[in-house]
Amino acid sequence: MGDSFVSRKDRIIASAIEIISDSGLSALTTRNLALKENMSEALLYKYFGGINEVLIEVVDYYSRFDNSIRNTVKSKEGCYMDKLIDYLEAYATYYDNYYAISTLMLQYEELLHNMDTREKIAWCITERLGFMEKIFAGAIDSKEITDKFTPVELANNVTGIAMAYILGRRITYHKKTFKQEYMEYILKWIEMLKKVD
Amino acid sequence: MKVLVAEDDMASGKFMQKLLSKYGEVVLARDGIAAVDEFVNAVNNNERFDLVCMDIMMPKIDGYKALASIRDAERKLGLARDSRCKVIMISALDEGFDSSYASDDYEEYICKPIDIMKFDNLIKKLDLI
């Protein structure tokens, strides 16, 4: 009943994210989306010009809170590694509670091949990595962590591990939540970076 | 007092439930669409929420959009502006609150982690207790 007060466009985007999560990016077609929304394909075109327009909105939704999270982390007191933990925890909590949206992290390459989403997703990836690189650079300069690795390597490592954990959950059942699993690893990894000479 | 807590995070939701249950009935919604759903169902059953605690980062539709839908529902259901429910926006994104968002639609905005005393004072300030 409440659905009738939620805008149709918003519900279509939520359904699109669920389709991608359940069946992959290739399953996101106007036909499947119309079926899931219990509407005709013709009606779907009233809201979106085509599937790529839906996909652009999905990518927007995926990166919707990025600036807010970065600004919040920047404003917090504490050392660089505490900021990194806050930053990663924000995403881990969000992905834990919205499992479907985490699928976007596994679709980067496809989204980069799509000319309509390429720019947006490239910007999103670059900004996320860039933000972490700055944190790592600060941590290295202030000798919080080892300088054996470059900020780029460290940011890639954190991102890669997140992708591996998200992928792993789509293959087998995991008793722990994504946040528990990922943050446990991150904390151990940070401790290791602090100890390496 | 009847409260709708729109909160996707289980731990935060349970905390809010515990915090608010001393004042009355608490209904928990785990995503934006469920929150709007609960709200409209209550109105249709001639019940109403006195307070909505709305998290911002939520699945399906975020807190901004869920709030807009709730206000839209109130208008369409013919609820006068002065009888609409009170809304507190809640987020961990302290520096990131979207200031362009219509602040007219909510009464207060608070950051996580929630300070119990401050929250109680806030409810008093809103004349809910």
Image (cartoon, coloured by chain):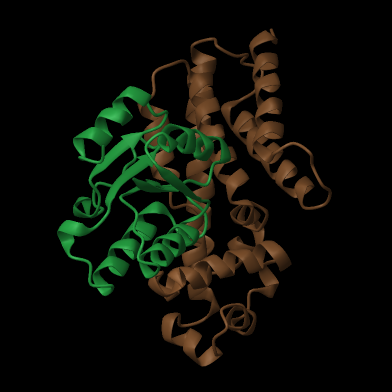
Chain colours: A brown, B green
Seen from the viewer's position, the closer of residues A88 and B70 is B70
Q: How many marks?
A: 0
Q: Is residue B113 visible?
A: yes
Q: Quadrant of residue A89?
A: top right
Relative vertical location of residue A158 with respect to residue A171 in this rendering, above or below? above
Asked if residue B59 is positioned above or below residue B127 in the image, the reply reads below
Residue A92 percent across, percent down from the top left = 59, 39
Give me the residue at 50% from left, 36% from top.
B12
Could you say where residue A142 lies in the image, as x and y percent from the top left?
A: 49, 11
Work out whether A145 lies above or below A70.
above
> Residue sitting at 65 percent across and 21 percent down?
A187
Q: Residue furthest right?
A: A172
Residue B18 percent across, percent down from the top left: 48, 33
Left or right: where does residue A165 sit relative to residue B5? right
The reply to whether residue A116 is in sight is no
Is B3 placed above or below A108 here?
Answer: above
Please provide percent x and percent y for residue A97.
59, 47
Residue drawn at x 54%, y 9% as measured from the top left:
A143
| Residue at (69, 7) in percent of width and height | A197
B105 left or right, relative to A26? left
In front: B11, or A48? B11
